[in-house]
Image (cartoon, rainbow, N blue to C red):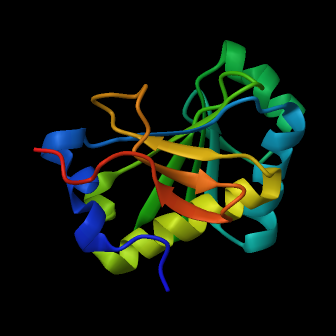
Amino acid sequence: MPDLLWDDVKNFFDPNLMGTLPDVSIADASVDDWQAVLDLVRSRGWTCEYSEDGAALWLPRAERMLARGVEASVMLRVWPVPGVLAIFRPYAADSIDFDVDLRELQGQARLNVLCSFLRVIGRAMSKPVLFAPETDPGHPVIGFDVEADRVVLLADPHFT
């Protein structure tokens, strides 16, 4: 059974209503949590591209990546499956932030990919992973709930 059903949440995935690049975040993070993300990328075999100031480099340890994030334009692109991209921007150790593109997340199959991705990351850190519209980043609409061990609704998907 999927965490969420497309027909129930499709409004949250409408780029015209929500913006194209919703914000996904994990608060109260640490260097160890960032390292857990990097370890997941490696252990899961997810395709990735790490860059500093536009130059592609080998994926470093979290400490180095975070140190460079302050002074350089650092980006980690991760494809959990072909055609679905998450872009991590390591600005600070205390928050893990990334974007996904709603145009890539249309339909039940792609929603399942997103839910699985959020679940894997949230489980690795035992922390909530919140998904908020680009147009209203302070109000998450779905997220990984640690206690429920699944992605759940956090807002009414039938807004008008």
Residue situated in front as seen by the camera: 80 or 10: 10
Give percent across and percent down for residue 145: 63, 54
Q: Is residue 14 left or right of residue 42?
A: left
Position of 42 relative to 31 (above/below): below
Give percent across and percent down for residue 134: 33, 33
In terms of image quadrants, where is residue 122? bottom right
Q: Residue at x 34, y 41 (%)?
A: 21
Residue situated in front as seen by the camera: 103 or 71: 103
Query: Is residue 41 among the parts visible in the rendering?
Result: yes
How many discs appear?
0
Give percent across and percent down for residue 11: 20, 55
Specify the farthest residue to the bottom.
Answer: 1
Q: Is residue 144 left or right of residue 59?
A: left
Q: Is residue 73 left or right of residue 113?
A: right
Quadrant where the image shows the C terminus: top left
Specify the farthest residue to the top.
Answer: 71
Q: Residue at x 80, y 57 (%)?
A: 124
Residue situated in front as seen by the camera: 16 or 63: 16
Position of 88 relative to 63 (above/below): below
Q: Residue at x 54, y 62 (%)?
A: 151
Position of 112 relative to 156 (above/below): below
Q: Residue at x 39, y 69 (%)?
A: 111
Q: Is residue 17 left or right of residue 83?
A: left
Give percent across and percent down for residue 45: 72, 72
Query: Is residue 61 among the parts visible in the rendering?
Result: no
